[in-house]
Image: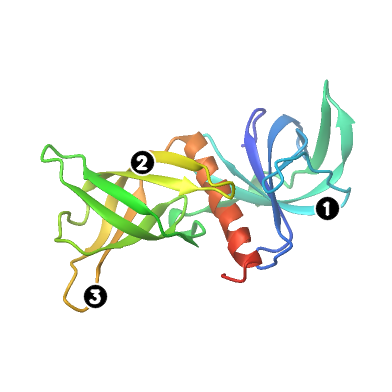
Amino acid sequence: MIKAGMRLTLESGHRESTLQQTYRCKVVEFTEDVIYISYPLNEETQRSAFLLKGTKLLATFIGYDQNVYTFPTEVTGREIKGMPVVKLFYPGDTKLKSIQRRNFFRVPLTVKAVIESEQEQQEVMEIMTKNISAGGIAGSFHHSLLFNEKDLVVVRLSLPNREGALQHLELKGEVVRITAPTSCKVGQLSIKFMDMEKQTKEMMIRYTLKRQLDLRRKGLL
């Protein structure tokens, strides 16, 4: 399941802790029970991280089947493999846990998103997102109902990062739930992402993990 060149996201600490850190790295080489990775880059500082031997981590990666997998691991040492690498314990394919789409971690996020129909009539509506995950988004709207459940759509939105820069995305999706607005409440819309490129999915997973950490440190989660 693990292959050289794969990107890994590593989490240290418990997800409920403000001390949690996230890192990204690549698999350089692997054996039956050891994964050699490039020196991890801290997602917050954007600097190489020095992980002590014995550091326990949770690793996440996207397999060639496009499913997301996690496994517990631990730093076991360092070596030189043409470059400095960190050694991680690999518990084996049988210990991998597949994350179902509905279990992707959702984080609160309020940004404008444009929803456009893939059909010929090219219906377009604007929503305000409430939360986002690597699996989809949920949002609200005030205008008339333009879509139905199971409609195929294109979602355009921009994700802000800590530095204020924007990551512009155009994602295919399917409407899984929609309710019309009334005089008392706004309309609600949920979309699951479809046919997402592996690199984009990895970025979304890292983004939601980092935003979760930021919100927790601010006491907002």
Label 2 sits on what residue type? Leu
Judging depth in this view, the residue of 126 and 121 nearest the camera is 126
Judging depth in this view, the residue of 182 and 91 nearest the camera is 182
Disc 1 to disc 3, C-alpha distance: 48 Å
On the image, the x and y values in percent for residue 152 come to 23, 45
Instruction: Give the residue at x 78% y 36%.
Output: 39
Instruction: Give the residue at x 62% y 67%.
Output: 218
Label 1 sits on what residue type? Thr
**Tag 2: Cα neighbours inside 10 Å, few (<14), some, or many (≥20)?**
some
The C terminus lies in which quarter of the figure? bottom right
Work out whether mark 1 precedes mark 3 in sequence or the reverse, and give the earlier one.
1
Judging depth in this view, the residue of 68 and 108 nearest the camera is 108
Badge 3 marks a residue whose secondary structure is: loop
Badge 2 marks a residue whose secondary structure is: strand
On the image, the x and y values in percent for residue 163 come to 59, 46
Residue 126 is left or right of residue 130, and the answer is left
Of badges 1 and 3, the one in the foreground is 3
Q: Which mark is residue 185?
A: 3
Label 3 sits on what residue type? Lys
Residue furthest top in the image: 82
Disc 1 to disc 2, C-alpha distance: 36 Å
The residue singled out by tag 1 in the image is 55
Work out whether mark 3 precedes mark 2 in sequence or the reverse, and give the earlier one.
2
Of badges 1 and 2, the one in the foreground is 2
Badge 1 marks a residue whose secondary structure is: loop
Q: Which mark is residue 171?
A: 2
Q: Which mark is residue 137?
A: none
